[in-house]
Amino acid sequence: MSTSKSPFILFQHIVPQRGLSRLVGALAASEIGFVKNAFIKTFAHHYNIDMSLAAEENLTAYSSFNDFFTRSLKDGVRAIDSEPNSVVSPADGAISQLGKIVGDDVFQAKGQSFSVEKLVGNAALAAPFKDGEFATVYLSPRDYHRVHMPFAGRLTDTLYIPGELFSVNVETAQNVEGLFARNERMVCLFDTSVGRMAVVLVGAMIVAGIETVATGKANPTGKIEHVKHDLQLDKGAELGRFYLGSTAVVLFEPNKMNWLDSFTAESAVVMGGKMGVTV
């Protein structure tokens, strides 16, 4: 389908993406009682969110919609796979795509791919992942929106990369060229026992912010912000969160790990569930 034949895609090209996201972000951050309670209750009902999993089940106890959206889960709700060589899902959601990176190309959807180098935003830092492995995990609005470590590693670099804010779903993946390497994102790079690993938090339309444990909430400046780190994080440890949700892309070097055969595009995943093994 061409973008000219899709009103939904055309709308996203012409709408002021950042202005709309700022407006929604202001509403999401509001702590005015009737505003945040109406927003939270309507959202929870519309998406049929299971609050029995949340550490705080009372919708009106949250200080803002953002507080509700980034809610924590009860202890023990998500068990982290304990096998030493397992790679786990970084989030609740569904697999958009996963498999091998072909040279520099990551499969996005039928007829579409994106560049590892453009995704990471730095040629030298992207180089280890060429011909490697990738998994793209989509977080729907009803999902838990914290992102966790798929494998233990030492955070060495973060790159905040400004970009567009297209919606992330099946239609945009099929019709927006290089979607995940075009949208605003936070690239997190790690040294692990099997080599380099990346977890990329990709923003989307009306996403009001991306936050990591190392950087805090990103403050868009319109330019790439590259920060060095030295922070060890265990498998399953919280890495970051979305204020309104999107997608996490996981990258590994070639010949270092394999995804389980049972996982394919559209497979449901839960944070901490085994998705692959290192070799």
Image (cartoon, rainbow, N blue to C red):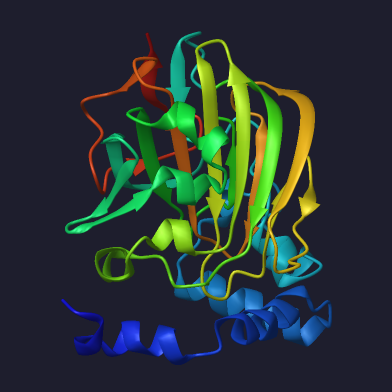
- The N terminus sits in image quarter: bottom left
Q: Can residue 141 be seen in this view?
A: no
- Please give the name of the residue rendered at 44% of the width and 16% of the height, measured from the top-left corner: 86
Between 92 and 105, the residue placed more toward the observer is 105
Residue 157 % position (x, y): 69, 35
- Please give the name of the residue rendered at 74% of the width and 86% of the height, measured from the top-left corner: 35
Residue 22 % position (x, y): 69, 81
Q: Tell me: 229 left or right of 273.
A: right
Q: Quadrant of residue 221?
A: bottom right
Between 111 and 77, the residue placed more toward the observer is 111
Between 4 and 124, the residue placed more toward the observer is 124
Residue 207 % position (x, y): 59, 69
Residue furthest toward the front? Answer: 123
- The C terminus sits in image quarter: top left
For the image, the number of numbered tags is 0
Q: In this view, does 126 lie above or below 235?
A: below
Q: Can residue 208 be seen in this view?
A: yes
Q: Tell me: 236 left or right of 101.
A: right
Q: Tell me: 84 left or right of 137.
A: right
Q: Quadrant of residue 203?
A: bottom right
Residue 124 % position (x, y): 55, 34
Q: In this view, does 259 lie above or below 181?
A: above
Q: In this view, does 178 lie above or below 128?
A: below
